[in-house]
Amino acid sequence: MSKPDVAAVKAFLLALQDSICQGLEQADGLGRFVEDAWTRDGGGGGRTRVMRSGKVIEQGGVNFSHVYGDAMPASATAHRPELAGRRFEAMGVSLVIHPHNPYVPTSHANVRFFIAEKEGEDPIWWFGGGFDLTPFYPFEQDVRHWHQVAHGLCQPFGEDIYPEFKSWCDRYFYLKHRDETRGVGGLFFDDLNRWPFERSFAFMQAVGEGYLDAYLPILARHKNTAYGERERQFQLYRRGRYVEFNLVYDRGTLFGLQTGGRTESILMSMPPLARWEYDWQAEPGSAEALLYTDYLKPREWL
């Protein structure tokens, strides 16, 4: 197995953060990302970039982090006990975009690399990541486009890759206590080292670079759609589900908190506004009900 090139991964991730921020700024037309560089006491740091009150994007963040230390946290060693006692490095780009308009979906993407080393032994490494879409008023055309981009970037790596990682995404972004998916899925993968380093790295690159291709056409299609207070209130209610998932289930959030990461950067994914309402029910046959009946369950989109 080829030796991991940690420097090449870091260089790609830094460039990816730049290109995604530039693409989103151009699509928004007004908002700009403000950078907040930070360091971690235990080793490492990152660049948090946040846009607030853009023309299209109400709040969004695109983070780069690179942290390292002498021992992996419990969230990592729980399912990989062979990592105990190894020095680790973890780096990645993670982003969440919360638009103003309820007709524009929230989107999330993440690509990351882990390596754990111990003197006298081969390094243990893997890639992870993916992207997923969380619409409030979904359009089948958008969801098909999102999954077509995901399918296309997977094709050079094998016919079985999209179905496998699409299914993994459906399972991962699932709120057990609500019995519903967070959105309409996309791709999710973790512990990826089934191929040599170069091919695994190439797949992670394809996922990272595919995000804008998947999201920007959807954003452009709906950013000027008229909406009212009803749609806004439903958007805020559904954002509450996003918060629930991130705080209860998300492995990246747990990893960041357990490694002593920067809390403001870890919780950058939260929406600027959200609400909860006791036992809210959608009116049968309404646009809001359509989300629950047709979209918040795993489906084949292609």
Image (cartoon, rainbow, N blue to C red):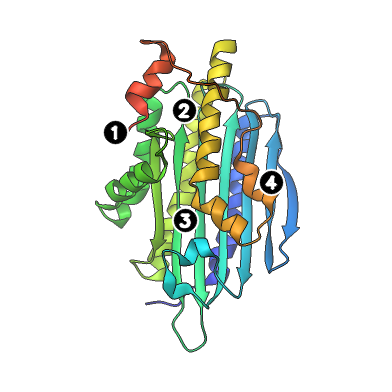
The residue mark sitting in front, 4 or 3, is 4
Task: Compare residues 168 and 301 and report the one nearer the observer.
Answer: 168
Q: Can residue 204 be seen?
A: yes
Q: Gap in Å between the C-alphas at discs 1 and 2? A: 15 Å
Residue for badge 3: 205
Q: Can residue 14 be seen?
A: no
Residue for badge 1: 299
SS category of the residue bearing label 1? loop
Residue 135, which numbered label? 2
* Residue 297, position as x, y percentages in the image: 33, 32
SS category of the residue bearing label 3? helix
The residue lying at 46 percent from left, 28 percent from top is 135
> Do callouts 2 and 4 mark residues in contact (Cβ within 8 Å)?
no
> Do callouts 3 and 1 mark residues in contact (Cβ within 8 Å)?
no
The residue mark sitting in front, 4 or 1, is 1
- Give the side of residue 205 with respect to residue 199, left or right: right
Amino acid type assigned to the residue bearing label 1 in the image: Arg
* Residue 26, position as x, y percentages in the image: 63, 35
Task: Compare residues 21 and 41 and report the one nearer the observer.
Answer: 41
Q: Image height check: is 230 above or below 97?
A: above
Residue for badge 4: 49
Q: Gap in Å between the C-alphas at discs 2 and 3? A: 25 Å
Give neighbour class at mark 1: few <14, some 14-19, many 20+ (Cα, 10 Å): few
SS category of the residue bearing label 2? loop
The residue lying at 45 percent from left, 77 percent from top is 3
